[in-house]
Structure formats: C-alpha cells, structure tokens
Image (cartoon, helix red, strand yellow):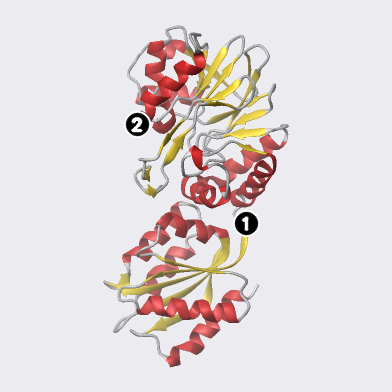
Amino acid sequence: MFDITTDVCYIGVDDPSQQLFESQYHTPDGMCYNSYIIIDEKIAVMDTSDSRTLGEWKQNLAAALDGRTPDYLIVHHLEPDHASGIAEVCDLYPTLQIVCSAKAKQMMPQYFEDSTLESRTLTVKEGDTLSLGRHTLRFIMAPMVHWPEVMVTYDEADRLLFSADGFGKFGVYAAGADDWACEARRYYFNICGKYGTPVSTLLKKAAALDIQKILPLHGPVLEGEQLAEALRLYTIWSAYDVETEGVFIAHASIHGNTAAAAGRLAEILRAKGCPKVAVSDLCRDDLGEAIEDAFRYGKMICMASSYDAGVFPPMYDFLHHLDIKAYQRRRVGLVENGSWAPSAAKTMRPMLETMKQVEVVEPVVTLRGRMKDADIPQLEALAEGILKC
C-alpha cells in the first residue's frame, strides 16, 4: 500500500505464487491485482481483487480507510481477477454504492447471487461524471477491451486514467516498470490482441485527455517517458502494424531435424542482411511468447514436421492461437518435413490463408527427413522471397 498522489492510494496485492494466469499463461514472477482508493469528501474504491488475494486486499482497504466509510465502488471490469470482492465489500459497508456500466450491471448476477446488489448499483454511460469533492471522475466506455462491460475512468483533478486491463502486463507490481514492453507485449497480444479495433477506439478517446499517469489493473503505474512509450506501442499493436523489422521463425520438430533446419535458415537470413531473426521452439518455448513474436515482426516462417497426414500438433496449436487472436497483415513462409508423405504444408497453408491479409511466400520448402546440402538452395530461395518488401 502506498500513495500515488496526495489523495489516491494503491491498495492492490502482489501474488508471487500465481504461476499460471487465466490457467494458460505462464507467469514465473507471479501476478499483481491492482486496486486503488481515492480519499476525498466522498471516497471511491477502484475495483477489488482476485479471490486468491482478497484477505490481504481487505486489510489494505481497511488500513487506507483508517476508520472511514467508502461511498462508491467503481467496477471497471467484471472479470473475477478484479471483481471477486464485490459482494464481500458490500457486506462490510452497507451504504456503499456500486458504479459500473449498464452491461456490467446486467452481467453481475452471473457471478453474485445477492439480489440486493442491483438496488445498490448506479449505471453510468459515456461522458457521465461523478463528483467526490476535489476529484471529478469522468467515465469512458471501452467495450471489448477485452470484455463487453469494460469502462475506464479519468480523474480530472489529478489527470489519472484508470485503464482497466488496458496497459497491463504480467508479473508482480514490485517488479516495477523496467522493461515494461517485454511482458506488456506478451500480455497484450494474448489477452487483448483479438480486439485491436476497440483498443484503437479507446486510444482515440484517450488522446483527447491530459493524462499524467495511467493506472492499470495489472502491472505498474505508468508516467513520464514510460507512459509515452506505452501509448506509442499500443498504437502500433492495436493497428496490427509491425513493431520490429525482421523475421520470426517458429518450428515444431519431432526428432530435431526440422529444428536444425530452422537454425540453418536463421543463419542464411542473417547473412542476407535481415536486421533481426528470432527463433522459437514451439515444442518447448512458451506459446504466449511465440504469439507475441509473431505479431511483433512483419514476417514469419513456420517450419514443421508432418504428422498423421497433417502437421505436428504444436504447430497446429500455434496457428490456431494466431487465428483466434486475429493475426493479420503479415508475410509467412512455410517449410515442411516428411519422410514418406510430406503433409505439413497442406495443413498450414489453408490455416494461414483464412487469416486477414496473410500472404504465403513462395517457394514452400519440402525436406525429407534430415536437411541435406541439396536442400540449401531452396532455403536460400525462401529467405530471399521472405525478405522482399
């Protein structure tokens, strides 16, 4: 618990034991669940916490209140990792009023059976304001960033943007904002990546505000140069633009032969002047990081073994994840490996061609078992093809 401004205090909780966020994303450093409180003539609590951390969160809330009673609970996002404490905090403070979007009010009975919550809920819409005294809160709707009920709040007094899941990152709060982009990028493309258009819409609304600090529900408070960099990167990411010039090689290899070919292809690309080559082993590396890199670079090469008359499952899973995250506007090369009936490319190509403005680059390279010297000219040709503008 610490002060962000004179009247705004952080009451969130770090959970270093949370090693698998949303039951799918590896978080070796844990996760933070951010919550804030504004102390004014009236007091507003900004979101609650995850069920795993509610005990510590309630202690932080009580310490910040120091015997006072909160007037409002602002619910920016109803996902359980931020809203699990709604019913409990309402029981603790019977006069507390919930403030949320109309969609959040509609969805609330899905998570809480307490029928009294509806009568204690004030719904707000785009541009509505709430005065706490010195602080005036302006509510901005942000549907599908990344749930339909999401809203953000702008504090006109201290020029703070409470950004819900926007501008979040994996990791605990104590890690700070150093190297924010690394885990923020992985977070964005795996959590919000499908929703580039809604994120762009929110960015346009934010551009009209004088924002001094961004207070997300995960990750550090952003200000100064870090805030400016976050806005720059979100503009790139939400538009599905290329952040880094280079080629990402994703390979799925059964016995290591396709992996060896991936290493040789990376050498060929570097020798031809490719500014950056990133390589991921889809069988062993973090899938979330592979998805992050696929979006980061403008060009990708998928290399996979054939398997059961299709493609090796780690590659299939990777391409499926790219599809549901709206992968688009990229050039992709294909390398398949098959000892007797190569089939990986015929599975990968149609998966990619269903994605928006994804171009499959020729030639598609076919390996037979182990890469041989005779295969190098084909890899050279693919490298030249993928590097063409």
Residue 363 in view of the camera: no
Q: Is residue 163 above or below residue 123?
A: below
> Residue reaching furthest left?
308
Query: Could you say which is closer to the camera, residue 293 or residue 39?
Result: 39
> Mark 1 or 2 closer to N-term?
2
Query: Could you say which is closer to the camera, residue 207 or residue 159?
Result: 159
Q: Based on the displayed image, in which of its 4 quarters is residue 262 positioned?
A: bottom left
Query: Could you say which is closer to the camera, residue 354 or residue 187?
Result: 187
Give the labeled residue for mark 2.
52
> Residue reaching furthest bottom?
374
Query: Which one is closest to the eye, mark 1 or mark 2?
Result: 2
Cα gap from disc 1 to disc 2, whole angstroms: 37 Å
Amino acid beneath label 1: Asp
Give coordinates of residue 312: x percent, y percent: 32, 69
Residue 216 in view of the camera: yes
Residue 345 — which label?
none
Give the labeled residue for mark 1.
241
Give coordinates of residue 382: x percent, y percent: 53, 80
